[in-house]
Image: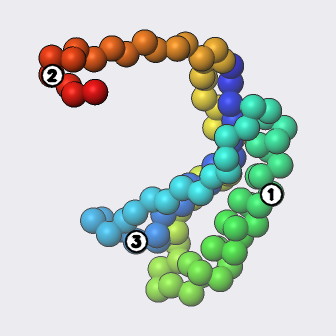
């Protein structure tokens, strides 16, 4: 089974050892359509960062980002029960 989420990755407009990348994302959805609905919110947030936050820095050209995208992950759709047994010799129950 595949799950989906909308993701935005951007840095702090710095270089070298001070550069840090951040990730904002939606929750995971079982439907790609639901995840895509969150892309507009992330695009709006990216616009806010570009227009208000990083445009006022000394070197706004250092602000880098990846356009919002849909991340896909494969998961098992069946729950497999686990049977865990403890040896009473080592554990008090």
Disc 2: CA contacts within 10 A as few (<14), some (14-19) or many (>=20) = few
Contact between labelled residues 1 and 3, with CB atoms less than 8 Å apart:
no
Task: Determine which of the numbered discs, if any, sits on residue 60 in the image.
Answer: none
Q: Residue at x 64, y 73 (%)?
A: 50
Find numbered disc 2 in the image and state the secondary structure of the residue it sits on: loop
Disc 3: CA contacts within 10 A as few (<14), some (14-19) or many (>=20) = some
> Separation of disc 2 and disc 3 at Cα?
53 Å
Q: Which of the 4 image quadrants contains residue 16?
A: bottom left
Q: Tell me residue 52's x, y (percent).
A: 65, 83
**Mark nearer the N terminus (2 vs 1):** 1
Q: Residue at x 68, y 50 (%)?
A: 26
Of tags 2 and 3, the one toward the viewer is 2
Provide the residue designation for mark 2. 90
Q: Residue at x 59, y 81 (%)?
A: 53
Provide the residue designation for mark 3. 14
Provide the residue designation for mark 1. 40
């Amino acid at each position: 089974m595949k799950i989906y989420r909308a993701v935005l990755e951007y840095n702090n407009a710095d270089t070298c050892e001070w550069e840090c990348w951040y990730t904002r994302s939606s929750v995971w959805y079982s439907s790609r359509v639901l995840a895509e609905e969150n892309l507009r919110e992330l695009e709006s947030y990216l616009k806010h960062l570009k227009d208000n936050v990083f445009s006022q820095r000394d070197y706004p050209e250092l602000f880098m980002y990846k356009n919002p995208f849909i991340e896909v992950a494969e998961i098992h759709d069946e729950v497999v029960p686990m049977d865990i047994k403890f040896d009473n010799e080592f554990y008090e129950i």
